[in-house]
Amino acid sequence: MVQSMNTKVDLTVKGTSYLGLTSTGKIMIGDQAFEYYNDRKVEDFIQIPWNQIDYIAASVYFNRWINRFAIFTYESGHFSFSAGKRNKELLRTIQKYISPEKMLRSLGFFAVLKRGILNLFKRKKSS
């Protein structure tokens, strides 16, 4: 049985984890950690303490819709999640425990494309 790290839960929502194969489950925001529990496999869970989070990046479309967000940790890499239509509410709840400076907007499609093209030209000039 999995033991929760939280002593008090602020929000519980249905969510999707994009780690490896996509899985659905519950996302819990509490006083000690961000937690994800898979609905089908009890052993498949993710617990990220607040002090291990480096920053959070959200994919924002049309300045209002948040598709998904990624949590970047100091040691374990990054984890991508989505809570459907409740992403905005979930990220506002996380702001109680993570400073707003650590919550970022990820680059859009065209910004990533532009950056990649510029890097190609820089590589050709240096060689």
Image: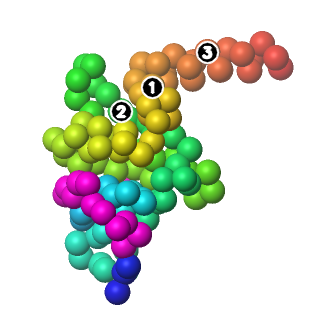
Q: Which mark is residue 96?
A: none
Q: Residue at x 25, y 19 (%)?
A: 62
For the residue marked with disc 1, what is the amino acid? Leu
Asked whether the viewer can see residue 68, the reply is no
In which quarter of the view is residue 94 placed?
A: top left
Against 86, is 124 above or below? Answer: above
Which residue was labeled with disc 2? 59
Give the percent coordinates (x, y) of residue 35.
Answer: 36, 62
Give the percent coordinates (x, y) of residue 99.
Answer: 46, 36
Which residue was labeled with disc 1? 107
Q: Residue at x 29, y 70 (%)?
A: 38
For the residue marked with disc 3, what is the amino acid? Leu
Q: Residue at x 54, y 53 (%)?
A: 51
2 and 1 marks in contact (CB < 8 Å): no
Comparing 20 with 72, the one in front is 72
Q: Residue at x 42, y 46 (%)?
A: 97
User: Alpha-carbon neighbours of circle 1 within 10 Å: few (<14), some, or many (≥20)?
Assistant: some
Placement of the N terminus among the 4 image quadrants: bottom left
Asked whether the viewer can see residue 35, the reply is yes
In the rendered view, does 13 fall on the left or right side of 21? left
Distance in Å between CA atoms under marks 3 and 1: 15 Å
Residue 78 is covered by the magenta coloring: no
In which quarter of the view is residue 18 placed?
A: bottom left
Give the percent coordinates (x, y) of residue 52.
Answer: 56, 54
3 and 2 marks in contact (CB < 8 Å): no
User: Alpha-carbon neighbours of circle 2 within 10 Å: few (<14), some, or many (≥20)?
Assistant: some
Distance in Å between CA atoms under marks 2 and 1: 7 Å
Q: Earlier in the sequence, mark 3 or mark 2?
A: 2
Q: Earlier in the sequence, mark 3 or mark 1?
A: 1
Residue 5 is covered by the magenta coloring: yes
Q: Which residues are magenta?
A: 4-21
Which residue was labeled with disc 3? 118
